[in-house]
Image (cartoon, grey):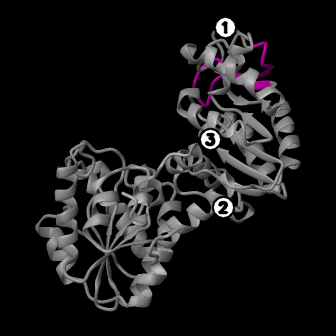
Amino acid sequence: MAVKTLDDLLGEGVSGRHVLVRSDLNVPLDGQTITDDGRVRAALPTIERLAEAGAKVLVTAHLGRPKGEPEPKYSLAPVATRLGELLGSPVELAGDVVGPQAKAVAGSLAAGQVALLENVRFDPRETSKDATERAELAGELAALAGEGAAFVSDGFGVVHRKQASVYEVARALPAYAGGLVLAELEVLSTLTGDPARPYAVVLGGSKVSDKLAVIEALLPKVDKLLVGGGMCFTFLAARGYGVGGSLLEADMVDTCKRLIEEAGDKLVLPVDVVAADAFAADANTRTVPVDAIDEGWMGLDIGPDSVRAFAGALAEAATVFWNGPMGVFELAPFADGTRGVARAIADSAAFSVVGGGDSAAAVRVLGLPEEEFSHISTGGGASLEYLEGKELPGVSVLQGSE
């Protein structure tokens, strides 16, 4: 990939220079407690290398989906605390994005220090559809860093967004690709190039409509496509099964019929499910074949026979991409399907890629060793769009093709 890299920047020298880093620190919170710090830890290597080289590191990031104004529940304060703990030195949080506090914090940074700007989405210009407004914010972010500054794009989870802190700022400052972005692209290019075969893809999550584009892009390329999660019920309905009160996209049934015909024996669907009479951890549950879900009951996980069938297919694979849980893994009665399939992927000899989002969270929440997977992505949406063949604006701008 023809871009300037973090190594190039460090080779030029960063001691005493401001470096603005766009990281992806969009962590899940329970109140003000981070429940999964995976994205913070993934951002560390680039930040540490810059700080150790004497840069004045100014990090910008978002959290959640605030509506273009400050919302306390979306403050990056817990992230600043955790980042400081991992770095071993305090990380000051500016109380605004590009205002007086941000200017003061940026101006007071010493060589080797790291500071974090408040949630960039507190400024409506970050996600504006007006390129002029986005460019204005990008210019103010660049001004914070000052003369001689550089920009490092290291938030892979946002490179599919044309947003001020991702796209326009890369045009306002000399721009470089961070180590995380480069690593993600290298892994995903393996999946879209000539992956070792058999190549198996496991897709879960709620809706077929969310994954339709990636299904259509991958079907001609894969040897097996395993479908679980809430989206499997629309496929099961397309096969003529009643799905009770399970999640169903009725307007996607005909599409699923077409996909089933096109896929042939590539497509593997669950053969049994864990059904419940309510969406709750204390619901009554039973495991039933996929053609025996009672009216009023809903499938909330794939069953043990499905896990064994999926595991059999995965054991033969040389390459595996997994995106989306097999069930409502956050509730204990419905976690075994996701755990079992994840365990099968980890136990296989395949080059295995966990496609970010809920899948990455599941690995950590369910206590599976991360090192048993070849790569755990930080960007669910970005990973899927790359595999769909879409252009990623935050990458194109680094290549100078935008």
Q: Which residue is mark 2?
A: 375
**Residue segment shown in magenta:** 272-292
Cα separation, mark 3 vs mark 1, equals 26 Å
The three-letter code of the residue at mark 1 reads Glu
Question: For residue 368: magenta?
Answer: no
Drawn side of residue 192 relative to residue 401, left or right: right
Residue drawn at the location 40% of the way across and 57% of the way down: 394
Looking at the rendered image, the disc whose residue lies closer to the viewer, 1 or 2, is 2
Cα separation, mark 1 vs mark 2, equals 40 Å
In this view, the residue in front, 209 or 197, is: 197
Q: Position of residue 54 (x, y in %)?
A: 36, 90
The three-letter code of the residue at mark 2 reads His
Drawn side of residue 295 relative to residue 79, left or right: right
Looking at the rendered image, the disc whose residue lies closer to the viewer, 3 or 1, is 3
Question: Which labelled disc corresponds to residue 295?
Answer: 1
Quarter assignment of residue 106 = bottom left
Question: Which labelled disc corresponds to residue 324?
Answer: 3
Q: Position of residue 268 (x, y in %)?
A: 79, 31
In this view, the residue in front, 140 or 297, is: 140
First in sequence: mark 1 vs mark 2? 1
Quarter assignment of residue 129 = top left
In this view, the residue in front, 137 or 101, is: 137
Q: Position of residue 71 (x, y in %)?
A: 24, 48
- View extreme (left): residue: 100
